[in-house]
Image (cartoon, rainbow, N blue to C red):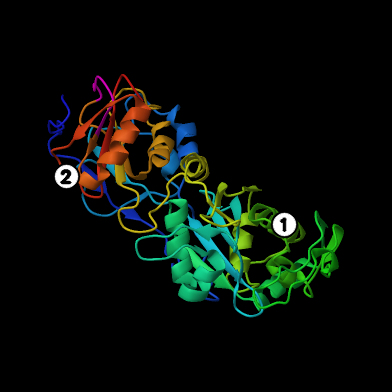
Amino acid sequence: MSIGDPPQQPTPGPEVAPVVRRRHSTETGRGVRRVRRRRTTGWWAAATVLSVLAAGALAWLGWQASLQITGGTPTVTDPSAPGYVAEVEPTPVELVAVEDGTGALAAALIVVLEPDGSGGTVIPVSSRMFVLATETAPQLELDRVYEQGGLDGLRDRLGRAVGFGFTVATSVTAAELVEVSELAGPVEIDNFENLSPAPSFDDPPVDPADAPIIYRSGPLTLDRSNVVDFLAIVGRGENVDNRSLRQQQVWEALLTALQGRDASDAGGSLGPVLADVLAGEYRFEQLPTVTLPQPDSIFVITVPDAATLPSFTARTIAAPVSAYPGQRPRTRILNGTSDPAALAPIGPRVVESGGLVASVGNAASFDEPATRVEWIAPAAEPVARRLAEELGAEAGPATVDPTLADIIVVVGGAGG
């Protein structure tokens, strides 16, 4: 079969099996309380079970927890049969905006939850990080984005900057953070540098040597009286990455102190998020950033690093969503070989190339000689070509237009 030829289809043709998802809130705003739900299985989990399935079968057992195949009378219902296709539920990625006592953005968290609803990856984001200008919006720090556009504005601008969207976005008030701190009790951190408040443009000039030190370096106890202020303070001369690491200490200490306690009803929407993280193993990651000098100025800004974000996203989020329509082309991955493990490495490469995994399944034949990548939507061509290069595969336009796909990857006996 050559690129551009319509794929051979069994009779009747492949049909996407319907998926039933458990309901959960996708509202944005303060105090959103969410019902616990099962998480989509990550690509790495699917890879584990791939090796135990019969030859030629789609590795489906690893996704049963999140892909509930039900309803209707689909024409291809056997996961081991040619032409079987099913939808992939996105990885839950939650954006939490934490406010200070004035309602300004003090900090943000990106929480990538694990497939089974327990544990995950916590990524602190400094409110002083910049997002670059777009065609319709100026270059701004995230706290200004939040001030001007609220939670929706933050969700949009940060998603555009990091290259993926959020399945849930919510804000947390200072009082709600205090409630979580009260449940945790006093916590100890090691403050790694003296913190004097950064001056504003309206403040009179002060010699840095004379600036009051609010938090000295060394052991520091945080409790309800100072946890919000310590999270929110912008230190004089403190760079964005150091501030993010300092804020990470706060979240690490709170999570450690909350071990064995039920945080699900505390702190508005913050408690349920932390409870989900505490339900399993979790880790912290720092968002890749880069410092850019400003033209005709002595100032620099820190922004998300576009060069390293693709690989960061691929290893952190198995099935990301788009921050806006068309950001990540929807990709269908089909196994055209008798090797049940053939699909395992493809998902992360789709994500790293800029796509999202929308559906997976079996090709019309298990005798495809080579891997190929076809784009349906013209706008998806750059991602398709980048993916094909990554896989060492041929690329070209497709002549079919499957539902919920902009790109088709057919994994063959060679390449990938």
Secondary structure character of the magenta stretch overall: loop
In reply to whether residue 165 is colored magenta, the answer given is: no
- State the residue position of label 2: 401
Residue 322 or 125: which is nearer the viewer?
Answer: 125
| Left or right side of 389 for 260 | right
The image quarter containing residue 101 is: bottom right
In reply to whether residue 369 is colored magenta, the answer given is: yes
Image position of 52 with respect to 101: above or below? above
| One can see residue 35 in this view | yes
Over which residues does the magenta segment extend?
Answer: 366-373
Residue 328 or 198: which is nearer the viewer?
Answer: 198
Callout 1 crowding tier (Cα within 10 Å): few <14, some 14–19, many ≥20: many
Q: Locate residue 262, reporting x and y percent.
A: 68, 65
Secondary structure category for the residue under label 2 = loop
Mark 1 vs 2, N-terminal side: 1
Callout 2 crowding tier (Cα within 10 Å): few <14, some 14–19, many ≥20: some
- State the residue position of label 1: 246
Q: What whole-number distance in Å separates the C-alpha atoms at marks 1 and 2?
A: 49 Å
* Amino acid, disc 1: Arg
Q: Which of pointers 1 and 2 indicates the residue nearer the eye?
A: 1
Residue at image coords 12%, 33%: 6
Q: Locate residue 171, reporting x and y percent.
A: 55, 71
| Left or right side of 9 for 65 | right
Secondary structure category for the residue under label 1 = helix
Name the image quarter holding the C terminus: top left
Q: Are marks 1 and 2 in contact (CB under 8 Å)?
A: no
* Amino acid, disc 2: Asp
Residue 107 or 175: which is nearer the viewer?
Answer: 107
